[in-house]
Amino acid sequence: MRLSVIGLGKLGSPLAAVMAYKGFKVVGADLNPACVEAINAGRAPVIEPRLQELIDAAKDRLCATTDIKAAVKASDASFVIVPTPTGPDGTFVMDYVLKAAQPIGQALAEKPGYHLIVLTSTVMPGDTEAHFVPALERFSGKRCGADFGVCYNPEFIALGSVVHNMLNPDFILVGESDEKAGALLETIYRQSCDSVPVFAHMNFVSAELAKISVNSYVTMRISFANQLARICDHLPGSDVDVITRAIGLDTRIGRKYLKGAVSFGGPCFPRDNMAFSKMAANLGTDAPLAKATDSLNKSYLDHLVARTIAAVPKGGRVALLGLSYKADTGVVEESPSLVLAQGLLAAGAKVSAYDPLAMPQAKEILDGRVEWAETMAACVSQADAVILAVPWDAFRELTPDQLKNGGRGVTVLDCWRQLSPALFEPVATYLNPGRTPKS
């Protein structure tokens, strides 16, 4: 089977590479010539673990073009994975999806036989049926469910582990126009996954609501764990890790995303939770849990700033290790670390910062206000407090002798528990969110 992937960005490029790696003939399409040139030259257009490895292994089955219509005509199924940015009202904008629908529909008009179109971009409940399908029918002159099929099939992945997540999904969500479309998509995934996936088939609107429901629920768990950590910070002798490990043993709860650490961020979690709340309001109802999650997420960063400022002298220096929204990616969109930096600066602290990948992107937002370090050691060498905000593996190599005065008088806030307390506690003030020693 021949596949086309429309959109070769942070998710589209890995999707095209995974499918080609798994034996499909894949043509990618993107209006950005740089992405197309990179794919055709055998280079990864974006930084993502294992992406280059898969492109190298599948180069004979993977090519790209700026001609969306040609890509669709050369394939049997097309995955549409273009941006759906958040609009001023908090809902997702369909402009790029509908722009892609025109050449896709025009290709269908000239193409004999059945074709499957898979919308992978996250959209608001109701948008696939109300906007995407009618656009395809209008531009093709054909009928969905008879001449072509449509599936809404969003990904549940995180930047930094996209390839792994695509090869080993927890489950695959399929909103389908008809059973034939859903069955064909299932056939594709049974070949492309390393694991044996579980499929959830349903109509469009249920799948659209399920997608943003997952992220709204996950963010609620993160905020609950951080709320618990904040309480533990005021309760001497308590330890949020001990507590979450215990309550996670309850099968009604489980342990995933239940760790008091840092607020959530990135291109999906904050906006999906906001969209969930806005959707409810547009329907004439309410989503108070989503609103509370958003409020807790923002206020927890204020708490971390206050805890750090209390540990440094007036006008002291804080070293911020990690600027991306998570490890193994350079993306700083909605990054909690940048909010921490801004809060520390507003409170009068000097800030030094370092990240293995995200420095160029962070400089666009904070340049002129933060001192940029070339290495982790340089970042922490003169700091009165150190915050390990992002769990990059490289930060595990931090040692007390790299700190100012060998760690004496320095506060280390190890948000993700990467360091050995036994190594740091004898010389520095070593803290975790949610862990308060008895006085």
Image (spheres, grey):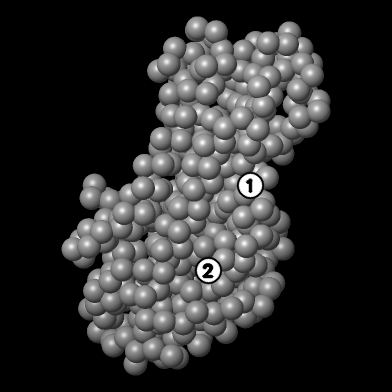
Which comes before the other along the chain, label 2 or label 1?
2
Tell me the amino acid under the disc marked 2.
Val
Q: Tag on residue 288? A: none
Q: Residues within 10 Å of mark 2 (few under 14, many from 20)?
A: many
The image quarter in which residue 251 lies: bottom right
Q: Quadrant of the N terminus?
A: bottom right
Tell me the amino acid under the disc marked 1.
Ile
| Residue at the spot of label 1 | 243
Residue 29's spot in the image, x, y percent? 46, 63
| Residue at the spot of label 2 | 27
In what element is the residue under mark 2? strand
Q: Is residue 325 above or below residue 365?
A: below
The reply, left or right, for residue 107 in relation to residue 38 is left
The reply, left or right, for residue 71 in relation to residue 19 is left
Residue 373's spot in the image, x, y percent? 61, 19
Residue 264's spot in the image, x, y percent? 49, 44
The image quarter in which residue 339 lies: top left
The reply, left or right, for residue 334 in relation to residue 436 is left
Residue 275 visible in the shown view: no
Q: Is residue 332 above or below residue 199?
A: above
In what element is the residue under mark 1? helix
Front position among marks 2 and 1: 1
Residue that appears at 76% across and 12% down: 406
Residue that appears at 62% across and 62% down: 250
